[in-house]
Image (cartoon, rainbow, N blue to C red):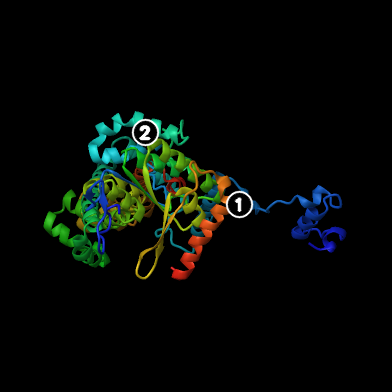
Amino acid sequence: MSDLDTHAPPLPGDNRSAKAGAAVNEADVSTADTVWVEEVSWIDRVPRSVSMLFVFVVFITFWELLTRSGLVSAIILPTPWETLEDMIFVGGNLLSGGYMLEALWITVLEVIYGFLLAILIGFSLGVLVGETIFGERAVMPYLVAIDTMPKVAFAPLFVAWLGFGISSKVALAAFIATFPIVVGTAAGLHAADENARMLFKTMGASRWQALWKMKLPTGLPHIFTGLKIGAVGVMAGAITGEFLGGGKGFGELIRVAASQLNTPRVFSLILYLSLVGLALFALVVWAERRLVFWHKASLTRAGG
Amino acid sequence: MAGLIPPSNGSVMLSGRPVTGTRRDIGMMFQQATLFPWRTTIENVVLPIEIRDGRQAARAAHDKARALLELVGLKGFEGVYPNELSGGMAQRAAICRMLVTDPAVLLLDEPFSALDELSRDFMNMELQRICREKEATAFLVTHSIPEAVILSDVVYVLAPRPGRIAEEVVIDLPRPRTLDMITTPKFGSLVERIRNRLEVEGPL
């Protein structure tokens, strides 16, 4: 603290000297000079809904200008308005229970079955790999090896094995979604700290008890991270399966629309499909909030 | 001593029986409270009973757990989840979890070293009171010489390379101990004696 600070009037904008001056002699400096606030940029103070709307409007405007300028052929990129018109048509078909609803239902079934299968296999393998040394040593390397393969390339195989029906799509969807769940489960089982393990040991807990009452609950946040990644992958798997293996699902509708150069239809089908993916993701987030209620970080992340 | 790690040599005898694994009559506590966040305070306290005798027995032990929580001054926090407890409160809940099975011996591994100085003093006095009320024997491992002196009847000074007991210091301060004793000459000389011994033995 120097005398300089007290006697010289603090420079406006130099908050540090104003504060130091106040600490030495409050009478010399009026409170108006000492109270200062952290400056927050105005763009960070805009409410979320407004900023989201803003980005949406900018995007649509850019899209509209791009189609009007004639730089891109109307066949390749439809206008936002055309897309909206088609979305209304597709929405009407879905609501009236038309052929599109049937196709959507097939895809939804593939996604649900695929996800359930992936959870079952992924969780079991995750426990094997995360809980046993044998699993970690002997099984994990193979899982990593398979995980690095481009899994979409297996689609023709699944079609050859399981036919053009729903099962080949379920298989591909589950195949893609299994690995993140395995990794999430295995990582979760390693998340319990040394003290917790020691504590269970002093209480004479069996391995099964330690797994169920300590390791699995501790690992739930990791497991849910795996489930979230899996939920995204299962959607991609089902649609890829339909692209490559035919069938009667939504992917087939997209493929047909694309082959007819009906791009507005492709756009609107994709948008409706994303709603299914969003719903599945939201379901996982909802389950996470219910089960991992103590994990505050996961709550805020899920809320975002 | 808790039967967690096999000994390199020698044996541990407790109540006439050798310790060859974890035992019911040993209660243990670590630096961290290690409460599980998905269980309420009382569910954490009855956890050892749930592990050993199942859910039925755990439910039956709720009254006992409530009494213990009252003993450590946590009445009213039974249904609270641990992330709402402060560090000292969590450690007290951990004490209850250790006591709920009525162990003959308490093994405390630097139980309060994660707490601030004032809470630590307070918790040490609480520990003394609880041990008196429960008539429990406690082994406390600590890096704080004053803590060792204020709490103990006997201090075993450990020396490294090879790990062994370097000296046995009997603390003949009257019971119950109070924090005022820290400033007495007797206390000071005991602390000095242990400190000198540790310095002779070299750094850990």
> Residue under circle 1?
A44
Residue pictured at 25% horizontal, 31% vertical: B56
Residue pictured at 40% horizontal, 34% vertical: B68
Foreground label between 2 and 1: 2
Who is closer to the viewer here, A301 or B24?
B24
Who is closer to the viewer here, B62 or A23?
B62
Q: Amino acid at mark 2?
A: Ala
Who is closer to the viewer here, A67 or A242?
A242
Relative to B145, say whether B93 is above or below: above
Which quadrant: the N terminus of chain A? bottom right
Residue pictured at 46% horizontal, 65% vertical: B198
Relative to A183, say whether B101 is above or below: above
User: What is the count of numbered marks?
Assistant: 2
Q: Are marks 2 and 1 in contact (CB under 8 Å)?
A: no
Residue B174 image offset from top left, x and y in percent: 49, 44
Q: Amino acid at mark 1?
A: Asp
Query: Left of B23 or right of it: where is A7?
Result: right
Residue B131 image offset from top left, x and y in percent: 41, 40
- Place residue B71 in its image quadrant: top left
Tell me the crowding category of disc 2: few under 14, some 14 to 19, or many 20 or more residues within 10 angstroms, Cα based: many
Whether labels 2 and 1 share one chain: no
Who is closer to the viewer here, B131 or A4?
B131
Question: Could you say which disc has been placed on residue A141 in the image?
Answer: none
Find numbered disc 2 in the image and state the secondary structure of the residue it sits on: helix
Tell me the crowding category of disc 1: few under 14, some 14 to 19, or many 20 or more residues within 10 angstroms, Cα based: few
Residue pictured at 82% horizontal, 59% vertical: A10
Query: Left of B51 or right of it: where is A191?
Result: right
> Residue under circle 2?
B65
